[in-house]
Image: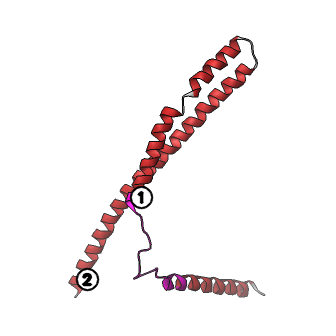
Amino acid sequence: MSFEEEWAALRSAAAERTAMRVNGVQAEGGGGGGAADLVVNRDDLGAIGNDAYALRTRLAKDGDHARPATFDAAIALTNGNFTSGAAVLKVHDRWRTHLKTLLDSCAHISNHLDFTKAQHARDEVKIVGDLASISKLTEYMK
């Protein structure tokens, strides 16, 4: 089989798969005139963002209780010439690093959802404005 024949067969198979997917979407009520393809509920985004913020706030307060005691224990063990003092200090440092990472992640989720909610509202305004201008053009064309 030549390259051209193989290429034509692959293109034909891809076109058939695409047609099947498109036909399947239209049969399920998606596409053009049916139900909306993209649905974002701003209340859901807001609730998840608020939960992430609440988790971050609580974690910032409650996630650091053991760290000062761990630091004090590490210093006491090190001063007492115990080799485990360095290991406990390493636990202290790792806990602080991981807690900061988790706090940053919660803040990132909260901020991203707030941004997404606001961006969706801006997109909605733009789409409504674009549709209004298209309907005005349609009226002029009549």
Percent of width and height locating residue 55: 48, 43
Q: Residue at x 59, y 22 (%)?
A: 69
Q: Determine which quarter of the picture holds residue 5.
A: bottom right
SS category of the residue bearing label 1: helix
Q: Which residues are magenta?
A: 23-43
Q: Residue at x 50, y 86 (%)?
A: 27
Vertical order, 42 against 55 (above or below)? below
Q: Which mark is residue 34?
A: none
Q: Residue at x 57, y 85 (%)?
A: 19
Q: Determine which quarter of the picture holds residue 64.
A: top right
Question: Mark 1 and mark 2: span between their CA atoms?
Answer: 36 Å
Percent of width and height locating residue 39: 42, 68
- Principal SS element in the magenta part? loop
Q: Residue at x 30, y 74 (%)?
A: 131
Q: Which mark is residue 44?
A: 1
**Which sits in the foreground, 111 or 127?**
111
Residue 17: in magenta span: no
Vertical order, 111 against 62 (above or below)? below
Amino acid on which the number 1 mark rests in the picture: Asp
Q: Residue furthest right?
A: 1
Percent of width and height locating residue 36: 41, 74
**Which sits in the foreground, 35 or 21?**
35
- Quadrant containing the N terminus in the rendered view: bottom right
Residue at the disc numbered 2? 138
Q: Between tags 1 and 2, which lies in front?
A: 1
Residue 95 located left or right of residue 2: left
Asked whether the beta carbons under mark 1 and mark 2 sit within 8 Å of each other, the answer is: no
SS category of the residue bearing label 2: helix
Vertical order, 66 against 46 (above or below)? above
